Image (spheres, rainbow, N blue to C red):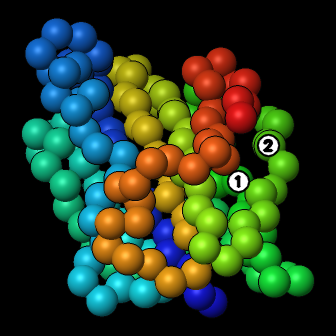
Amino acid sequence: MDAVVQWVCTSWTKKSRGGSEAGCRNAAPTAFLLPPGMSAGLHEVAMRESDSFEPRTQVRDLSAPGTILREADGLLRVDPPEVSMFAMPRRNRRPPAVRLAPGQWLRWQINYRFVGHCDGAWSYRLETFNILYGSATPDVFLRAVPQVILRCGEHGAWLA
């Protein structure tokens, strides 16, 4: 499949919800340069509060990007990212799939809030999926965001 998915996952605790730590978290990018020579596949970028939001990257195949990608009739069908059953608030409704023509891309964001099993402490995660149908240049996701921006709102409302 001629597609590139960049999965950027930022995770934090209550410590980074306010003050200077929140500034560091909010400065974490939602897009990165692709590795040299990457024309298809999954580029994972993880940034954790415990690592001072320093990006950790790896490249994998498209079998596990957290989204469902299918080619049909010359378009790429992108079903929304799977929502964790342990995340809050509950999001039982999912938005419809998006279809991309060759050369088009989208940014899909979803935020989560989790409660710890032992201590009840909250943790948070923002997942950003930058998805391109077609050949990629290293800076493709650093350009102006396309018109199709889908984001899961704080209270489970899907915004377009």
In the image, is residue 37 above or below residue 22?
Answer: below
Q: Which residue is at 13% across, 49% downward?
A: 54
Q: Which x, y percent locates residue 116?
A: 40, 29
Q: Which residue is at 50% across, 58% downward?
A: 130
Q: Which residue is at 63% across, 33% downward?
A: 152
Q: Nearer the viewer, residue 155 or 41?
A: 41
Number of numbered callouts drawn = 2
Disc 2 element: loop
Q: Which mark is residue 43?
A: none
Disc 1 element: loop
- Quadrant of the image containing the C terminus: top right
- Quadrant of the image containing the N terminus: bottom right
Q: Which x, y percent locates residue 62?
A: 54, 81
Say whether residue 146 is left or right of residue 16: right
Q: Badges 1 and 2: C-beta atoms under 8 Å apart?
A: yes
Q: Amino acid at mark 2?
A: Arg
In the image, is residue 54 above or below residue 156?
Answer: below
Classify 10 Å Cα crowding around label 2: few (below 14), some (14-19), many (20 and above): some
User: Residue 37 appears in which quarter of the rendering?
Assistant: bottom left
Q: Amino acid at mark 1?
A: Pro
Q: Is residue 116 visible?
A: no
User: Residue 104 appears in which quarter of the rendering?
Assistant: bottom right
Residue carrying label 2: 94
Residue carrying label 1: 80
Q: Is residue 19 visible?
A: yes
Classify 10 Å Cα crowding around label 1: few (below 14), some (14-19), many (20 and above): many
In the image, is residue 133 above or below residue 13?
Answer: below
Q: Which residue is at 37% across, 29% downward?
A: 123
